[in-house]
Amino acid sequence: MKKTIINTVLPAAFALLFIGSSSFQPKNKWTSLLDINLSQWEVYQSYRHTTSYNGNVPSGENGKTIEPIGYNKNEANVFSVVEDSGEPALKISGEIYGCVYTKQEYENYHLKLKVKWGVQKWEPRKDLLKDSGLLYHSVGKAGVDYWRSWMLAQEFQIMEGHMGDYWSIANSAIDIRAFIPEGDMNTVASARQPFQPVGAGKSVSSFCLRSEDHESPEGEWTNVELVCFEDKSLHIVNGHVVMVLQNSRYVVDGQEIPLTKGKIQLQSEAAEVFYKEIQIRSIDEMPKKYAAYFK
């Protein structure tokens, strides 16, 4: 989870702030992002975080700052490709915080994948729900967030009972059409409580809970889709839209800067998780079946 503060306010009417073109080919056709060599991804690892972590750069017994593991080292084989029903699946052990991230940036696209939980959990989440995340519009260097593990980005939460929540990473911000229910989101009870439908809620927070829980039963694959067009995005779980977002941006010294393209990250966050059938295609408009969410 991430600990930053942003403003997420639903405007009375949405405005288009940025228009761009797709940066990848072939246009409108599905392209696989996963192979046995992870040839389209790179790796970043930070630290084996503990329950005492407080957001500061970790230091040793002598008080000297500990450097992160860094780029493309894959210590403890945290990221590996295994076989599932004859096809490749990305296994993330979660032992060390970090991510795999695409070598390429993407803009105006439809992404889909399947996700399933493993059994292993690590500190500092041994007593908490299993956690990971799909980060999009990722820019800049890794390690700029609270956990010092990821690039500035928007997050499609991948978490037990919370598939599709929104989190800001570092100083990202976005307008959200959803309510934030009360309660501790790291409890099983919170994952099962009823949620308001997608609507005109307002909040000031670094996160927002999805409208409904549509995660597959334990041990089964959950279908996840992310649709991004211009400054808009949709979080979709097993065919259900659970989060509607617009005006993607980040804030520097009070100035808002559009955030509509970037790399894709998949988090290692103290829980074993598997991803497969990771596919992406470019789009030249918001699909008509989803356009009504933004009226």
Image (cartoon, rainbow, N blue to C red):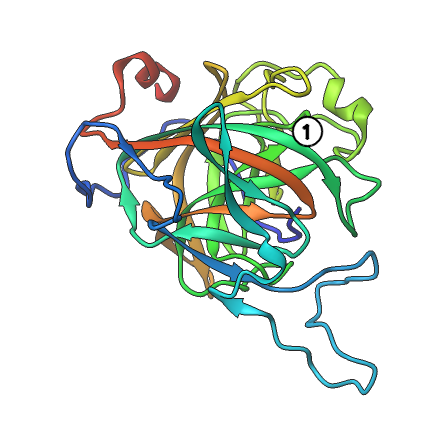
Look at 47% across and 58% down and name the residue there. Answer: 43
Residue 114 in the image, given as x and y percentages of width and height = 48, 26
In this view, 248 is above or below 172? above
Residue 259 in the image, given as x and y percentages of width and height = 36, 49
Instruction: State left or right for residue 256 relative to residue 220.
Output: left
Instruction: Choose between 197 and 97: the one closer to the eye.
Output: 97
> Can you identify the residue that label 1 sits on?
160
Q: How many labels does the image show?
A: 1
Badge 1 local density, few (<14 within 10 Å), some, or many (20+)? many
Residue 128 in the image, given as x and y percentages of width and height = 79, 39
Look at 46% across and 61% down and name the residue there. Answer: 254
Instruction: State left or right for residue 149 relative to residue 276.
Output: right
Q: In which quadrant of the rendered view does residue 30 lie? A: top left
Instruction: State left or right for residue 37 relative to residue 143.
Output: left
In this view, 178 is above or below 23? above
Amino acid type assigned to the residue bearing label 1 in the image? Glu
Look at 67% across and 33% down and name the residue there. Answer: 118
Instruction: Choose between 60 and 177: the one closer to the eye.
Output: 60
Look at 26% across and 24% down and name the residue there. Answer: 286
In this view, 133 is above or below 220? below
Instruction: Choose between 181 and 53: the one closer to the eye.
Output: 53
Residue 228 in the image, given as x and y percentages of width and height = 34, 33
